[in-house]
Structure formats: structure tokens, C-alpha cells
Amino acid sequence: MANELLTILEYIEQERGISRESLVRALESAILTASRKSIHPASELKVKIDPATGQIQAWAMLEVVESNPTCDQLVIARAKERFPDVKLGDVVEWEVTPRNFGRIAAQTARQAIIQQLRKAEKENVQEEFADRVGQIINGTVRRFEAGSVIIDFQKAEGIMPSKEKIHDEQYMPGDRINALLLRVDINTSGPSLIVSRACREFVEKLFEREVAEIHDGVVKIMGVAREPGKRTKVAVMSTDPRVDPVGACVGMRGQRVRNITDELGNERVDIVPYDEDIRKYAVNALLPAKVQSVEVDEEKHELIVRVTEEQSKLAFGKKAQNVRLCSKLIGWNISIRNEDDGAEPKNNSIAEQLRTAARNLAAELNVSEKTARLLVNNGYVTVDDFKAADLDSLLDIEGIDQDEVNVARNLLDD
């Protein structure tokens, strides 16, 4: 048993990267917990493993008494056999190792040892990855569990929940993958590393990696608005008037931003210059649409943006994506209003258009307006959009009524 134990300790130390000392402590605790009844009835027991030989011994802390000992006591006559100078009232460390204790330990403590090893391994993961939270880490796709992706990061396993995946991105076992480490959770039974490719911080770190001026602090990212897998807007500014922030991010012949869009599965990335003047900032954010004017309503925290009929489609974007991202980027509500020659401005606010679309979709799908609003806000504006969408993507929408979605899909399929 001692030789087997030494072999196991050496293997785990080398393969798992857990120190011999922590393994020995974990095993001592596990064996004591699992084998207490078979060792001795004393209330205070210790199990010791010699890390050099693998020998396992058990010890009880016993008080020396004259006679009539309890399970926590030892008569002085017997104590003197090992400790000639012992006195009444002394507490001695008395070996109580059972015969065949190695076999008993192996049989009764296996599960406890596994649990202790997992705990030690997770603590090692915590130490290894704690200072990498918020950074991009690289791993290999291993398997899939309930819509989540399990990733091997060599020294630990990570999990990318379905909501943290880029929409429509497909993975295969063995694929190399980059993801942002959100947190390290060693209290769960599953993988300890929680990672994401859908958060806006992932885009920020990609820019920091690709653009030297951002890494050096010459160019700063002032805001990111993102719909993962579809489109992202990034606002940048320069601390050096000689450096063009947008040009630095785009790179020579667009190579820098192309590397980022490739990593994001061809997600469209718009880079816009930041401006402290909210009007100018809004004009920049709404590009490629050309804006006629911007009015500020401080009370409603709203910007009224006037564009020509020709530019209104660009301003709104496909499924109102452009104006929605602009609103998130600058932190103001935006109302787009068409401005025709000699005609009264026609109110085409994005909020009103979304409300109308939600009402129509609710009626056509026979779902609640709340469900319809969530669908519209996530880009499913028409029945055709709803039918063409992947069911898992619909059910992953935060707050969605899954029963309503399933019923509506079944009716359409029929």
C-alpha cells in the first residue's frame, strides 16, 4: 500500500501540478474522516503519512490516569511501557494504527480522497488563474453540456455558458478557442473557469491586443455597444493630437480591424471617434448615415436626430440595429425624424417603431406583448425572422417565456 500511495502521489504531483505537501494534508484529513470508527474511539485523533515512505499511522491524544480509563484516557501502567517518565494528568500521543490500516484506508477513504484532491486542485486553479480574470485565455474545445461549451485550458477546465457564446458560432471538439475569463468559481462541482466570447469586454481586449496604441494608452476606448455575432460599435479617442484614433484601430489596409472581425466570426465592427459634445458624438456614432441636425432634450435624456428620407434607412439600420447600438454607445435615447423639403418633420422615433412592431408581432404569433417586445428588441421583428431563427437562440433570450415561444413555433411549423 505504501508503494502504491507513493506512486499515486508522484503521478498526481506531476500530472495535476499539486504539491506533495498539500496532497499529503488532504489525504490525512480524508483518511481520518472516513476511517475514524475503525481507528479508535478517542475524540481526538490524528493520521500521519510519511511523504518519504508512504507509511500511514494513526495516533490518539490520551490523558494518563490511575485506573478506570475512558476512551480518551490511558492507565499509567500501560503508558509507562512507552513513556517511562510519564505522570498522572499528562496527555500522550498514543499510536493506535489498526492492523491492515493501509487496506482499510484504501477501501473506506477513496471517495473522500477524490473530493479532497478536487478541492486541492481547484485551489490550485484559483491561484493559477486569479490574476488572469478579465484577460483573454486560449484553450481547446472538449465537449458540450446542455448548450454550454466545455473548454480545456491545460491546467483547468472552463465552461462557456450558452448566453456567453457568439450567436450562430459553431464549435467542434478539438477546435482552438479564445475567450475572456469572467471569473474563477472553485465552489461549483463543474469547471472552475467561467469564460465568454459574447461580452463587450472581449472586444475591448481584442482591440488592446491588436492595437499597440491602445495597449500603450495613447488611444483609449471610451465605449462599446455590442450585439454579439451581428454588430459592434466602438468609440475611441486619442491622447496625442498627432495620432488618429480611428486610423490606428483600423490599421494599415484595415489589417488590425480585420483580425478582430475574423476572431469574432465576421461580426461587423464600426469604429467611431468619441467627442465630449454629445451632438457631435451622436453624429459620429450614427455613421454611415449623414445627419442633418441634432437637438438635445435634457429633461427626457433624449436626442432628436433629423435626417433626410434617403438617409433614414441607414440611420435606423437593418432591424433598427444601427440606432439601437448608437443609443447604447452614447447612453441617450435617440429619436430619428425624417426631414423632407417643405414638409413637417415626421416622427419616426425608434421607440415608437419598436412598440408598433411588437404589437403586430404579438397579434400574428398569438403571444403576449412582453414576449413580443423581447423578440423585437433582439432583432426578431417579423414572423419570417421568428421562423428563420434557431429555436435555441430564441429560448436563450433573457426573460423570454419559453412556453409561449414553443407554442408559437409549433403552430407555425404545423
Image (cartoon, rainbow, N blue to C red):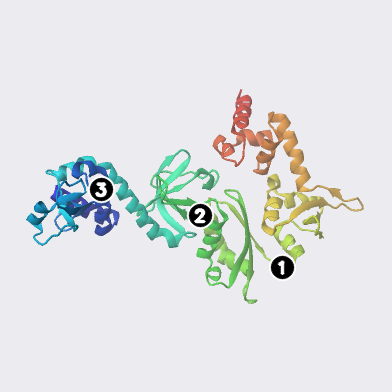
State the mark number for residue 226. none
Type of amino acid under label 3: Ser
Q: Quadrant of the C terminus?
A: top right
Mark found first going from the N terminus, 1 or 3: 3
In this rendering, is residue 225 above or below 414?
below
Q: Are marks 1 and 2 in contact (CB under 8 Å)?
A: no
Q: The disc labelled 1 sits on which kind of residue?
A: Glu
Q: Residues within 10 Å of mark 3 (few under 14, many from 20)?
A: few
User: Residue beneath label 3, please?
Assistant: 43
SS assignment at label 1: loop
The span from disc 1 to disc 3 (Cα, nearest Å) is 70 Å
Q: x, y (%) of residue 313?
A: 75, 49
Tag 2–tag 3 contact (CB < 8 Å): no
| Mark toward the viewer: 2 or 3 | 3
**Chain-order first, disc 1 or disc 2:** 2
Q: Residue at x 40, y 53 (%)?
A: 139
Closest to the camera, between mark 1 and mark 3, is: 3
Classify 10 Å Cα crowding around label 1: few (below 14), some (14-19), many (20 and above): few
Q: CA distance from mark 1 to mark 2?
A: 31 Å
Q: Residue at x 77, y 39 (%)?
A: 356
Residue 375, given in percent of the width and then of the height, sits at 66, 39
In this figure, which residue is indicated by the disc labeled 1?
276
| Residue 48 horizontal/vertical position (percent) | 20, 54
Which residue is under mark 2? 263
Q: Residue furthest right?
A: 342
Amino acid on which the number 2 mark rests in the picture: Glu
